[in-house]
Each structure stands twice: as structure tokens, then as C-alpha cells.
Amino acid sequence: MSYREDSDDGGSGRDLRKPLLNTGNWYRMSSRQSTTANLGSSAQIIRDGSVSVILCVLIVALGPIQFGFTCGYSSPTEEDIISDLSLSLSEFSLFGSLANVGAMVGAIASGQIAEYIGRKGSLMIAAIPNVIGWFIVSFSKDVSFLYLGRLLEGFGVGVISYTVPVYIAEISPQDMRGSLGSVNQLSVTIGILLAYVLGMFVNWRVLAILGALPCLVLIPGLFFIPESPRWLAKMGFTDEFEASLQVLRGFDADISFEVNEIKKSVASSSKRTTIRFADLKRKRYWFPLMVGIGLLVLQQLTGINGVLFYSTKIFESAGVSSSNAATVGLGAIQVVATGVAVWLMDRAGRRLLLIISSSGMAISLLIVSVAFYLEDIVSEDSRVYSLLGIMSLVGLVVLIIAYSLGVGAVPWLIMSEILPVEIKGLAGSIATLANWFFSWAITMSENLLLNWSTGGTFSIFTLTTTLTVAFVTFLVPETKGRTLEEIQSSFR
């Protein structure tokens, strides 16, 4: 582990921005050895560029699994936490929303942290407080420690939510970027499902301990993957940049064309020029920022996080007797549907998936809201009431499938693709902060809205999801089949 060190001649400005986590020269040594000697079995495997990239993605995907576990934790634990710590409904709602508050703080810092010490160092800084937060929640004896632990979890999630999609986009080959980028959201859904399933068998304190495991594995895993080559190039570490790219593409791959494209992009971005808020008025900056913020805000205004956080309660309102089992089933469906999205991302394209996804969500939300409205006017003993419960359940399933096919994964993917390299830190922080602010607002108000009117709550989400369809149709560009440098130069 190497911190920002001065060079022997007194240090230079560039040395002050060394990567926080230095993996050493293992990949450069392997690169040289591959030309002079036969490689061992493990080295032979890593010579395959696609395998190398996939392994890196799988390691950083532990971060989004942690993200999803945090989102799903509130649903199976609500009754037990309220009972054990004598909380009111509003106090538990605050607990659920504090992860979003912590994530907002993490989002503000995420861009600058990732720019200053690198993507890997940023993930390390996210993982440590996350682990501490889960242990604090597990051993909480009163509400103050419960809140503190939730805030620390949220901080880590806020940094992870920006850094992981950016890292994956920057290391992925052009033809795999969509699919690999979608692994971020797939991992989130796996984390949610794990929280739902494990929450059925263990109490909330044990579940919190289990929540720390993904980041406990991520921390050592970061020492075995290369830093983002695009970040290294931007910082001027030419040797490290080419070595990182070589191991990601395979030691036998010709990376000269990609090296030249990245160098040209970095040269044109004038990395030493300070970007101010006033510069965001230029179209090359404001348009991709508007698209990135718009997608991430509208993702939350669909109400999806509220549905996931309080899914058990929603199923109870729908008259489903085994609400916990239904919630687990919903999580499993989300994982499968997101897996389909991973397969489609580089085939159908981002924009088409977003249009189909948001349209399906709007229709399903309308079905659910109508079902809940009708449940208020029919007798609970009638056959119609049970049919309305099935109707709302089907609507929620369609909602999750539609969300998983596009609105769940694509906004984070597009944000990581379209932001120009010279403002990625600042703009990424703004976009991530906006996402988490609206996630906090939805999570904080969802329980209260459901108590006010379940049908009314879903009607509001129907309107905002319809707005998402229009936004995507008229403003969001297609990024499939283009390099990051081509996408970002198109806004100039």
C-alpha cells in the first residue's frame, strides 16, 4: 500500500496525486515474463483480456452488493427493530432514510475522492466506514447508535454508487461496456435479495453482521486489481496507464490504438485547467450533466426505492397473507430481470431499453394504483377484494421487471459514459448527490404516504414515470457501440 510520496528530487506536483492503492508491479512483471517464458496456470488465465476485466468487475461488484443489502435491510427488519428498541413509526422511517442522508454526504465527496486518490482508493475509503456502520447497527442498544451506524453505511454506499460504475466503464472494452456496466445494478439486486432471504431466518442484529461481509471481502480484493487506466492517463502516469490497460486487455493484445485514443482525449481535456461551476454553462458540459442528473433523479421519482424499502408493508396492504415470501419472490424476479438486461444492454442499446422500461413501469404503476383505490371501496370478505390483491401483486411484479430492464441499470451506466473527463469528478458528484437526495425524500415520505393513501401514492409515481418516458424519448442519446472518447467528444 503506497501513499502519495515525494520523489527523490524533492517531489513533483504529479507525485502528490499518486494512487492511494498501488498494486505494485505484478502485472508489468507478468507482461515481461510472458514474452520470455511460459506462464503458470493463473498467469495464463489472466492473459485473456476478457477474463481479466470480468474478474476486476466481479471484485468491485461486491460494493453494489453492499449497496443493495443496505436498501433491502429495512424491509424484513421493521417489526423487530421497532419492537426491540421501542421505536415509533416515524423514528423507523428516519432510520430507513438516514442511509440516504449518509449517501448524500458520500456523493458530495465521491467525485473529488475518486479524482484525487483514484477509483480503488475511493472504494477503500467507502468500504471501511461501511463495515464499521454495520457493526454499530448490530450492537445498538438505543436509537442514537442505530442512527449513527446507518449514516456510516450510507456514506460508504454514496461513494460506491458513483465510483463503481465509473471504474467499470473506464476499464471495459467498447463492445462489453454495456453488459459489464449493468453488472453494477445486477449486484445491487443480488444484495437486496440476500437481505430479503436472510431476513427471514435471522434476527436484525445478525443480519447487520452479515451485511458487513461484502465489504470485508472487497477490501483485500482491491489489492489484486489494476487502477483505472483512464484515470492514470489523466494524472500523467504513462507507464502505469499502459501497464494497467495491457493487463485488462490481455498481455498478447495490441493496445496501441486504444492508448493513442485515450492520450488524445486526455490531451484535449487540458487536465490542469481548473473547472469552475461557471464553466458548466457551456453545452459540452451542461447537456451531458443535464442528461445524467435528469436520469438519476427520475429514477428515484418512479418511487422504486420506496417500493423496495417497504415492500413487505405494501404486500400486506394488498391483502397478501405471506407478505415476506412475496417480498423474497419479488427480489428474485428483480435479479433475473436485471440479468436479462445485462445480456440485452450491448444488443438492444441503452435508449431503447430505457423507453421500454419506463413505459412498462408507468403502465404497471397505473394498474397498482387502480387496484388499491378499488380495495378501499369493496368489502375485505368479498371475492373481488382477493382478486384486487392479485391484481396489485401482478402490477408490482411487472413494475420490478420493467424497472430492472432499463431504469435500474441504464442511468448509472449513461452517467459514467457521457460525462467529460475534465468535469467527471465535479459533475459525477452533483449527479450522484441529486440521486441520493431524491432517494432520501422518497424513502422518508413513503411510509407516511402509504398510511395516507396507497392508491394516491402510486398515482403520484405513475405521473412521474410518464415524465421519464418523455425525457428519455426527446433528450437521451444512444451510447451503444461508441468509445468513451467518441461519446464525450460528440458534445463539443
Image (spheres, grey):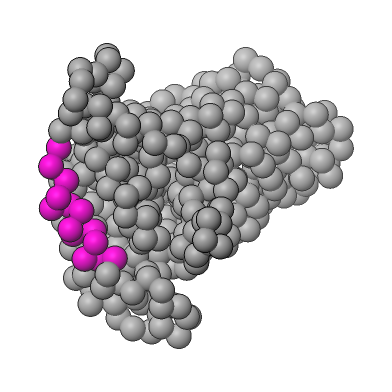
Residue placed at 32% from the left, 32% from the top? 29
Image spot of residue 370 (x, y percent): 43, 48
| Rendered location of residue 480, percent (x, y) | 17, 52
Magenta: main secondary structure equals helix
- Whether residue 372 can be seen here: no
Question: Which residue lies at the image location 84% right of the left edge and 44% below the top edge?
Answer: 144
Tell me the quarter of the picture where residue 478 sits. bottom left
**Percent position of residue 175, x then y:** 16, 44
Q: Is the C terminus in the top left, top right, bottom left or bottom right quadrant?
A: bottom left
Q: Residue at x 53, y 55 (%)?
A: 8
Q: Quadrant of residue 205 in the image?
A: top right
Q: How many marks?
A: 0
Question: Quadrant of residue 424 in the image?
Answer: bottom left
Left or right: 372 in relation to 477: right
Q: Nearer the viewer, residue 58 or 89?
A: 58
Q: Is residue 448 left or right of residue 336?
A: right
Quick one: which residue is furthest to the front in this view?
Answer: 9
Residue 270: % across, % down: 33, 74
Say left or right for 370 vs 283: right
Front in this rendered view, residue 441 or 159: 159
Closer to the camera in the image, 393 or 476: 476
Work out whether residue 223 can be spotted: yes
Task: Give the residue at x 38% y 31%.
Answer: 26
Q: Is residue 271 left or right of residue 268?
A: right
Q: Is residue 487 magenta?
A: no
> Which contiguous range is marked in magenta?
253-266
Residue 262 covered by magenta stretch: yes
Quarter of the image where the N terminus is located: top right
